[in-house]
Amino acid sequence: MKNRLRKCIAGVCIVFGIAVMAVPFYYHFHGANETDKLMEQFEKTLEDTEHETGEPETKESGKKQTGISKKDKAILSGENVIGIIEIKALDIKYPVLEGAGTEQMRYAIGHMEETAGIGEMGNCVLCGHNGSRNGIFFTHLNQIEAGDEVKLTDKKGELHRYAVSDTFIVGPYDNYVKKQTGEEILTLITCAERGTKRFICKCVPIEKAGEGDE
């Protein structure tokens, strides 16, 4: 009788242990699935406009109209999606949503509404989670290096390329990192030191990255 009870308790413990271990995997899978849905939900209804627009054109501003894929066009057609961010050095690519609240950052990267828009003059600030159970997001942002490229595609399909110029850590209330400037800057923000501080990544437009090196 005692042996049977021990076996029963052991079995319950094993099942409970497996369930506890499975929870993080479930959330990660669910988060990745929701992100994929966000990136693909408009794919079926997106019209193919490649024949209408012709070849990609170079804008006077120096930005390029990219020959983006149907999938990226689908992402950008989303009502709340304002762009796509891609950092090859970190092997990440996510939609960017307007707003940096809980809902926006659950499955995407958030744009702080009070800052400059993608590709606009001023300081464009994007925020992403570090260590989220729903995905990678900016978890490995602290591994990025000076000179690494950050690509942003805006709602119009225009590509904006940036190079990392500086990284540093600030306190949670050091809002100067969001301060607007008279020039185009991209600022990426995520948590650091178990959420007690913020990791900041400053980027400059790629065509300006090499100025002054001659």
Image: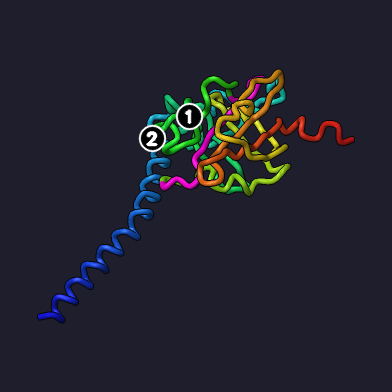
Question: For residue 122: magenta?
Answer: yes
Residue 167 x %, y % = 68, 40
In the rendered image, residue 63, in percent from the top left (x then y), is placed at 68, 26
Element type at mark 1: loop
Quadrant where the C terminus lies?
top right
Left or right: 150 in relation to 39: right
In this picture, is 122 found above or below 146? Answer: above
**Where are the magenta residues, as a range?**
118-133
Residue at coordinates 66% horizontally, 25% vertically from top-left?
Answer: 57
Write down the residue under mark 1.
100
* Main secondary-structure element of the magenta-colored stretch: loop
Evaluate whether residue 168 shows in this view.
Answer: yes
Residue type at mark 1: give it.
Ala
> Nearest the camera: 23 or 84?
23
Q: Residue at x 72, y 43 (%)?
A: 146
Residue 153's image quarter? top right
Asked if residue 175 lies left or right of residue 70, the reply is: right
Of mark 1 and mark 2, the one earlier in the sequence is: 2
Relative depth, front residue between 196 and 42: 196
Residue bearing mark 2: 41
The answer to whether marks 1 and 2 mark residues whose Cβ atoms lie closer than 8 Å is no
Mark yes or no: residue 70 visible: no
Mark 2 belongs to which amino acid? Gln
Indicate which label's residue lies in the foreground, 1 or 2: 1
Residue drawn at (64%, 20%) of the image: 180
